Image (cartoon, helix red, strand yellow):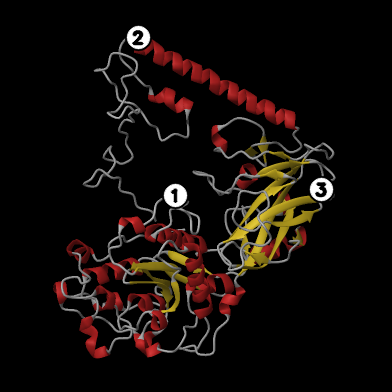
Amino acid sequence: RRIVIMPTANALGYYRNKREEGAIDPNRDFPFDIEPENSDKCMQTIAGRSINEVFREHMFQLSITFHAGMEAVTYEWGAPTYLNYMSPDDEAQAQIAQGYKRYAGKFAGTPDYKVGTMNDVVYYVRGGMEDWAYGGSWDPDRVVQCTPNTFGGYPPEKTTYNESTLRVFNMLVEASNSKTPPKTKTGTTEDLLTTNGAGNGHIARNLRIALMAIELVQPYVAILGAGGVVLEDDIVPGKDRTKRSCRQSKALLIPRGKKDLEVEWTVGGGFTVDETRLLYGRWDDIPTSIDGSTQLTDEDLAKIASKTKSVDAASGGGRTQWHSDGAHPGTGTYPTLGPTFRATIDTSSYSVGDEIAVYAVARLDSSWTHQPDNVKPQGPPQSHAVNARTNPEWRHENAGKVIQGRLFWYSIPLTLVVGDKDGGADATIDLSSRLNPSKIDGPRIGGFHGGSSGETWTGKISGHLIVAAAACTILVFFVCMILVRRRKGKVVYSRALMAQMDEFSDDLTFEEEDAFAGVGSYHDKKGGIEMPEYSDSPQGKREEDEEGGRVYTIE
């Protein structure tokens, strides 16, 4: 996911504590549903132009704009031309908005958010940002080229849009009746991720809405475990996902002749799981172009159709945790908030040493294509969010970004290595190695480090013990070096030695501290251990804002 945040779009208005930028309301400054003769009445503000530039450089699927003055979660339409009409994407918009409301929750004196279209719940406007972001690329009759006179003008081509840029679910969240609610109503971090938790408040519940938007932008499937062994999640920081590295980072040793190996997985990023299943086959029978790092295409499936087997989840379909009726099937014992699907696969036909790739597959939210009777303009769903998961023919490109529609979503595969032991209480063993394969020693799976084909559990543990013993030896040597140097009243830390200790560190180093003569000198004014400055920029220091806070950008 790419996350873009504009914390203060109307910077001047925020500084002056006013709605307008100068004398102009940025909320009405967009080229949607305004009269052509008023083309000089849009893109007049720096706020409007800044938002326009950000949207032109991306291809967003979901967006939220936070305001105040009432308490509601609303969506398109909000333009007078479409008063009493629904958008072509109304079903998905309504489900997402209701999901936001449920997860946001309520707190003392503040009820659940109202939900509905902007026309119904708030009021209609011309030049609204929300409708512009949703319909600007596919409803050309409502879009004009802006010719403002402010700030030396603005190029008209900046408000000419291709067919891909503006198809965003840009929802309006009216966060509070008061534009300056008391701090007692903003909430805390206590139970932050829990609906109606002890720390709920205006900020807390809107943080949850933002997190839910990040979750919903794309469906995902993740294998949780197999044969009673719980696996780590799919997030492996710094891991190269190409070249089938998943064969090493998510792997199990299973007994030979196993006819009923139960595999469990979860599905998220949507509401309704229409169908889900397992797809499995030998890695050696799968073309090398399928490496487990990208979603499978129809061409990929055609290549492996005769070489893989499929088995449906025992429950058929189900629901994610965002559904109004909650997750189904239940979560069971796994550390997940979503549903837990199960299916049993037969591996008895595979030989000792075979490595089996297991994918979990799911299709979600086909109901998003449904439409009410009073849709305007007439036509199928137009948003990226709906078509990306319901229309395999959907493909759009803009500013180097691509959105390709699909029906099915695939997990990072689990590798099952057939061992030389028969079944037993401890016959299924986790072989996963989530470290960088080039940095460690040990047996290999499919050309990567981890467990070898048919390797016994004793051999795996012995390899790990050797690595652990080596690490301990280096640690003792490192501590001795520190003690020797401290006797001289000076601490010198070696980059090379630290690199040996932790090859995955950020290469942190302590500066020489000649002014300190004894142990216990490294403390700040509050008595805690002082962390030294270190470099994470070409200039050799972090960027800081005026208050000393760190400045980060996520994209």
Which is more toward the observer, 400 or 185?
185
Going 30% across and 45% down the picture, which residue do you hit?
A: 550
Which is more toward the observer, 102 or 156?
102
User: Taking 366 as reference, is 85 left or right?
Assistant: left
Q: Which amino acid does label 1 sit on?
A: Glu
Going 44% across and 74% down the picture, which residue do you hit?
A: 114
Of tags 2 and 1, which is closer to the observer? 1
User: Taking 369 as reference, is 207 left or right?
Assistant: left
User: Within 10 Å of the Cα at label 2, are there few (<14), some (14-19), or many (20+) other Cα atoms?
Assistant: few
Going 26% across and 77% down the picture, which residue do you hit?
A: 29
| Residue at the extreme front of the image, as rendered | 109
How far apart marks 2 and 1 lie (CA) works out to 46 Å
As drawn, the label of residue 446 is none
Whichever of labels 1 and 3 marks the residue nearer the N terminus, that label is 1
Q: Is residue 239 above or below residue 366?
A: above
Going 59% across and 55% down the picture, which residue do you hit?
A: 337
Q: Mark 3 points at which residue?
A: 350
Q: Name the residue under label 2.
A: 487
Q: What residue type is labelled 2?
A: Arg
Whichever of labels 2 and 1 marks the residue nearer the N terminus, that label is 1
User: Within 10 Å of the Cα at label 1, are there few (<14), some (14-19), or many (20+) other Cα atoms?
Assistant: few
Kindly state the secondary structure of the residue where label 3 is placed. loop
Which image quarter is the C terminus in? bottom left
Q: Mark 1 points at which residue?
A: 190
User: Within 10 Å of the Cα at label 3, are there few (<14), some (14-19), or many (20+) other Cα atoms?
Assistant: some
Q: In this view, does 90 lie above or below 385?
A: below
Kindly state the secondary structure of the residue where label 2 is placed. helix
Residue 60 seen in the figure: no
Of tags 1 and 3, which is closer to the observer? 1
User: Taking 261 as reference, is 331 left or right?
Assistant: left
Q: In this view, does 533 lie above or below 271?
A: above
